[in-house]
Amino acid sequence: MTFVFPAEQRVLTPAEYAALGYVQIGNPPKSVADAPLPATIDFPAYRAETKEEALIDIGTGIVKIGYALATGGLGPATQTTLGYTISLLT
């Protein structure tokens, strides 16, 4: 079976494009995902008063995770990591 290249081309009509599922540029569908974020969202952030306080918090976290990993394995270490991180953010 041989393939025959068409001798001429044509442009699809807007209705044919819509039937194929294409969206015309300039007319995107409106959805909930396109809505802007509300201005009242507060994202948690860790801020230490000094570099020393930040280093103490990091050191404490490393010691807690190391102790949990050495005594209980990966599960307790993960729980300790999540708990300590959340306690710093709140």
Image: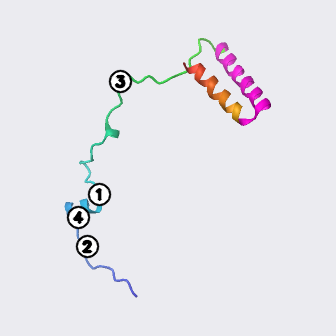
Q: Which residue is mark 4?
A: 16
Residue 9 tag number: 2
Q: Is residue 32 above or below residue 19?
A: above
Between the C-alphas of marks 2 and 3, the distance is 50 Å
Badge 4 or badge 3: first in the primary sequence: 4
- State if disc 3 and disc 1 touch (CB < 8 Å): no
Badge 1 or badge 4: first in the primary sequence: 4
Query: Regarding mark 2 in the picture, which secondary structure is present there?
Result: loop
Expressed as whole percent of the image width and height from the top left, the position of residue 47 reads: 56, 17
Amino acid type at mark 1: Tyr
Query: Regarding mark 1 in the picture, which secondary structure is present there?
Result: loop
Q: Is residue 32 left or right of residue 54?
A: left
Q: Is residue 33 left or right of residue 88?
A: left
Mark 2 or mark 1, whichever is nearer to me: 1
Q: Which residues are magenta?
A: 52-74
- State if disc 4 and disc 1 touch (CB < 8 Å): no
